[in-house]
């Protein structure tokens, strides 16, 4: 059962986001590249739908749901976040949507690593550095 809606997302998108977030918590760090790409495509689709429904607020709402963690497991991992970031942050992405994505997905993932006393992987550091280089105003 999904938690009640607290955002302006449609019920279908809200439920789909929570279902995918549950799948993320079960997703193995040993997943194949094909598994990573498939999961990333699902995430990209939901973030895009959130943006279509509510603009930056929708991106943030979906991102916040997907970035939630359980007390034992990280939801988004660095490999998925890298693929998703390349699609969700492009030259054509507005500053508001980019900022919403960074604050709802990237930042919580980075903070999750530090709370678990895990060092950020080279992939995650590279992703954040590339985002900061390409979109410095949103990354400040």
Image (tube, rainbow, N blue to C red):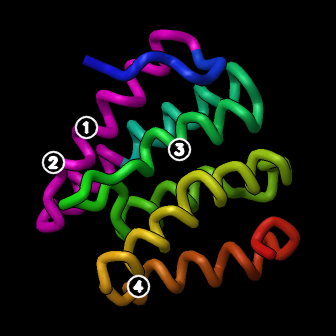
Residue under the point 15% across and 48% down = 26
Is disc 3 in contact with disc 4, using a CB cutoff of under 8 Å? no
Residue under the point 74% across and 54% down = 98
Q: Is residue 50 left or right of residue 81?
A: right
Please state the extent of the stretch shown in magenta in the rendering.
10-39
Work out how far the residue at label 2 is from the one at label 3, CA to CA, in angstroms.
18 Å
Work out how far the residue at label 1 is from the one at label 4, CA to CA, in angstroms.
23 Å
Label 3 residue SS: helix
Residue under the point 38% across and 76% down = 115
Instruction: Please state the horizontal and vertical placement of residue 52, each as a whole percent of the image.
Output: 69, 24
Circle number at residue 64: 3
Is disc 1 in contact with disc 2, using a CB cutoff of under 8 Å? yes
The image quadrant where one finds the N terminus is top left
Q: Is residue 2 left or right of residue 129?
A: left
Circle number at residue 22: 1
Give the answer, above or below, for where 107 lies relative to 5: below
Work out how far the residue at label 3 is from the one at label 1, CA to CA, in angstroms.
13 Å
Residue placed under numbered mark 2 in the picture:
26
Residue placed under numbered mark 4 in the picture:
120
| Residue 21 lies within the magenta run | yes
Q: Is residue 30 left or right of residue 56?
A: left
Label 4 residue SS: loop
């Amino acid at each position: 059962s999904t938690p009640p809606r607290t955002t302006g997302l449609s019920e279908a998108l809200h439920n789909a986001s929570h279902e995918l977030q549950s799948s993320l918590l079960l997703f193995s760090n040993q997943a194949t590249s094909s598994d990573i790409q498939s999961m990333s495509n699902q995430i990209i689709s939901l973030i895009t739908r959130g943006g279509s429904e509510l603009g930056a607020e929708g991106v943030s709402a979906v991102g916040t749901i997907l970035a939630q963690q359980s007390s034992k497991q990280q939801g988004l991992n660095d490999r998925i976040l890298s693929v998703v970031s390349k699609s969700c942050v492009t030259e054509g992405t507005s500053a508001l949507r980019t900022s919403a994505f960074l604050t709802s997905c990237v930042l919580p993932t980075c903070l999750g690593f530090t709370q678990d006393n895990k060092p950020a992987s080279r992939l995650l550091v590279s992703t954040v550095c590339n985002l900061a280089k390409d979109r410095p105003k949103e990354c400040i």
